[in-house]
Amino acid sequence: MTLDQPKVETAPAASEAELVRVEDVFKHFPIGASIFGGQVVKAVDGVSFGVREGEMLGLVGESGCGKSTLGRVIAQLQPATAGHVYFNGTDLVTLKGEKLRRVRRDIQMIFQDPYASLNPRMTVGEIVGEPLANFRVGRRKQREERVNEVMRVCGLNPNFVNRYPHEFSGGQRQRIGIARALVLNPTFIVADEPISALDVSIQAQIVNLLQDLQDEFQLTYLFIAHDLSVVRHLSDRVAVMYLGKIVEIADSEAIYANPLHPYTKALLSSIPVPDPDLESKRRPILLEGEIPSPVSPPSGCPFHTRCPIAQFPICSEQEPPLESKDGGHLAACHFAGQL
Amino acid sequence: MDRGETVGIVGESGSGKSVTALSILRLVPEPGRIVSGRILFNEDGRQKDVVQLSDEEIREFRGSDVAMIFQDPMTSLNPVLRVGFQVREAMTAHRHFSHREAHERVVPLLKKVGIPAAEQRASSYPHQFSGGMRQRAMVAMGLSNEPSLLIADEPTTALDVTVQAQILELLRGLNRELGTAIILITHNLAVVASLCTRVIVMYAGRIVEHGPTRQIFKSPQHPYTWSLLRSLPRLDETERHRLLAIAGLPPDLTNPPPGCKFHPRCRFRIDRCIEEEPPLEEVAPGQEARCWVLMRNALKPKEPTAPIQQGDGTA
């Protein structure tokens, strides 16, 4: 494939078929546990959504909202406390041993920190080839060829297979992490903040690479990020998380043109755009305070403590369900679209 | 930089933007030192050269004439001292306020930077504050001696976007109300567009372009500025287009390339760029750029340019 030609088309329209279905997933972490049970951090607190085949679903939220934990639960790196994760119709949560191992081939993860996620004592060839060895794919010669091929696809010089991670820059290390995720030809990739640790001028390189790879290999992505500008640029649909729950999910265009949840609206208005003329006219909707603790989230709607349009007592007593407001546009708010 | 002005210094990590700011306070970490040059500061019609100040004078200069806030407020606050004490200490270290005045100013200062329940929060410890509140406390310390210049080094980088919006609004308000000049150091061009009237773009330890923010964003003349602006995904984009990626990496400053420091990554370079470093020259009123080509010439259809290095290739 050529990475070099600028492409203008976007990814092919996502089919409606869901590759991944997340049903009522909870992930709680105990803290300060005693024999009588301690408190729990409700990192993911009852989340349901689907990822359609061939689409890039953006998952956004501020730090501590549970987006990374959700990504790890979906990729089966951490067990869910409760709920189901269906992949191609199979419930991963009930799979064990060899069956689960086989599914892992199809689900790969790209991590945020290109420094911490690569073993410094392994060469690039070993890192990228390790999944092949783990799954006993092909013979040694074939594996080496596959490693070379996937490195080329990711914009790395295959002559560097014997180098170590510290010899590479941040952007190149992220390419190594991407090559490792791709080497088994997965269908589904969970990318957890893959560009936020990189320099500005390098970010665009990785964003373009992720797009090219999607076009080339018909990948399905769950793209986790806090940077809504990048998510808008890449994603077909966007899910917004707040305090362990999804508060809004819709087509990328719809969510940016017409955010229904007041949190989404405030989040979008908080992001400055690189245009001084526009910026002088925009005024962010400033939220009071910061995200409450996920140990004891507010009653009712989790956002009511910061919400500019909350009405009492309904918002502090009844949790609004995530429901369809406008076609495929789902929002969890009693007063959706009123801010 | 004028009194009351807001200037943004943008650049990637390693471009020298933080060191530039630290030099203003003569806080460049060892073994770094200011090798040459002058840093002139005007106060009440008198001009002083920061580089020449004695240790005693520089101590007085820091904090009272120019204050600085840092990216990570947790490492800049002392974890074992109460926040109110630290704000007061910033004042008693200088001679502007008596101990009693300093004591009385703490709570109003915390209120001014938007810390709720300031009376109680003054006796909290930094770990009891959230990230945004810590940054507000840092701003309160910075402002406590009414400096005429506040240097903010990536003040919102560690914060979430909704909190970033709050801090930017706070800085904007302080600039308007108190007339405090602000130097904002950031890698985020959108933050500069939001807060600053003038922008300085740094690359490999040099200013490559500077000028009024609007002009730089509308008509950047240095290829680095131009490329950077096109490499950003934008929240307000209406159609999806491919991002322009800047090939290669920022140079290693122990062994910088000859000529223009950006030429290895520049798609508009000419032969002269490889041999000779361009000077910073005026390209429009108030705007200067360090480039032999300039974007207005490079973008002319028939202008001969070097073959364009397409793509993302680091390979």
Image: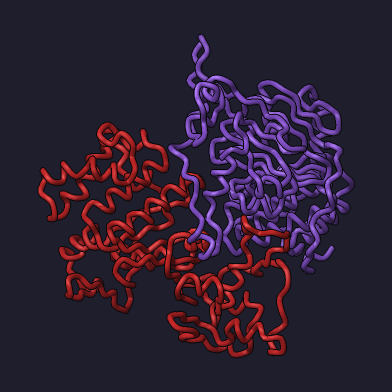
Chain colours: A purple, B red
- Count of marks overlaid on the render: 0
> What residue is drawn where x is 50% and y is 82%?
B290
Residue B140 location in percent, x, y? Answer: 29, 48
Foreground pick, A329 / B107: A329
Residue A23 location in percent, x, y? Answer: 74, 26
Foreground pick, B176 / B220: B176
Q: Can residue A68 be spotted in the picture?
A: no
User: Could you tell me which quadrant the C terminus of chain B lies in?
Assistant: bottom right
> What residue is drawn where x is 88% and y is 52%?
A142
Find the residue positioned furthest to the top.
Answer: A36
Where residue A245 sits, quadrant-wise, is top right
Residue A84 location in percent, x, y? Answer: 75, 24
Residue A99 location in percent, x, y? Answer: 84, 28
> What residue is drawn where x is 23% and y is 75%?
B49
Foreground pick, A277 / A105: A277
> What residue is drawn where x is 71% and y is 86%?
B301
Where residue A334 sits, quadrant-wise, is top right
User: Could you tell me which quadrant the N terminus of chain B lies in?
Assistant: bottom left
Query: Could you tell whether A168 is left or right of B258 in the image?
Result: right
Q: Can residue A247 be spotted in the picture?
A: yes
Query: Could you tell whether A20 is left or right of A277 in the image?
Result: right
Placement of A79 over or under B184, stated as above or below? above
Placement of B192 over or under A307, stated as above or below? below
Query: Could you tell whether B281 is left or right of B297 in the image?
Result: left
Find the residue positioned furthest to the front.
Answer: A338
